[in-house]
Amino acid sequence: MKRLGKWPSEKDYAPIKKSGDLAELTGAILGDGNIQSFPRTERLIISSNSDDEKFIERYARLLYKIFKKKAVLMKSKDANCVRISIYQKHISKRLDIPVGSKKKINIGIPYWIINNKSYLKRYLRGLYEAEGSFCVHKPTYTYKFLFGNRNGSLLRNVYRGLKILGFHPHKSKYQIQISKKEEVFKIKDLIKFRQY
């Protein structure tokens, strides 16, 4: 079956080529994803609001592009959630993302992303698509571009990435915020937030 190309060989589990798509997918997985380990394989899941069809389409497409596997979409029975998932060997190792909960682990920005502004923008896009929001309240002239997460290292990564790109974010315990009107619109356009 391997010779016929109907069963993956070890070369199909080779390191993944660095790219903007991989940088964005990495951000989305760190924001709203999880890797589970099983005796003979691993499962990668990215969770999405069921109503966010374009998010679901985008990240299912990126999974196919990078892993050459069609994602399975599973609607949760008791929540407004769709899980975008694939099974494959060595996902964690090839993505350099740990298996299991990321809540308390220290996650750094990969060197190949931090040293390339184009990749950094895509990485931030993935994180913001998963855990970000854009808010405007015109009566009070309030503009906010927010990233929220309970993992302190991810908050530091977003803060650092925004600073590298020339922005002036503010930090709180579980949130990174940009609140200058011109910067809010600039970062939103720069990372193409919600532009599907």
Image (cartoon, rainbow, N blue to C red):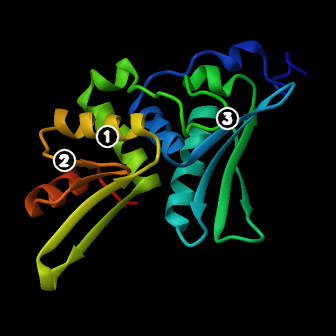
User: Is 135 placed left or right of 149 in the picture?
Assistant: left
Q: Return the disc, 1 or 2, that comes first in the chain's sequence.
A: 1
Residue that numbered label 3 is attached to = 100
The earlier-in-sequence mark between 2 and 3 is 3
Task: Using the image as rendered, state which of residue 146 and residue 90 is in the foreground.
Answer: 146
Q: What is the crowding at mark 1: few (fewer than 14 residues within 10 Å), some, or many (at least 20)?
A: many
The answer to whether mark 1 and mark 2 are in CB contact below 8 A is yes
Question: Left or right: where does residue 180 sit relative to residue 115?
Answer: left
C-alpha gap between disc 1 and disc 3: 21 Å
Secondary element under disc 2, as helix, strand or loop, is loop
Query: What secondary structure is marked by label 1?
Result: helix
Find residue 169 and name its label: 2
Image quarter for residue 140? bottom left
In the rendered image, which residue does mark 1 sit on? 158
* Percent position of residue 17, x then y: 49, 21
Residue 153 in picture, x, y percent from top left: 40, 34
Residue farthest front in this picture: 173
179 lies above or below 120: below
| Image quadrant where residue 29 sits | top right
- Decide if residue 138 is on the left or right side of residue 123: left
Residue 133 in the image, given as x and y percentages of width and height: 35, 62
**Residue farthest along the bottom direction in this orientation:** 139
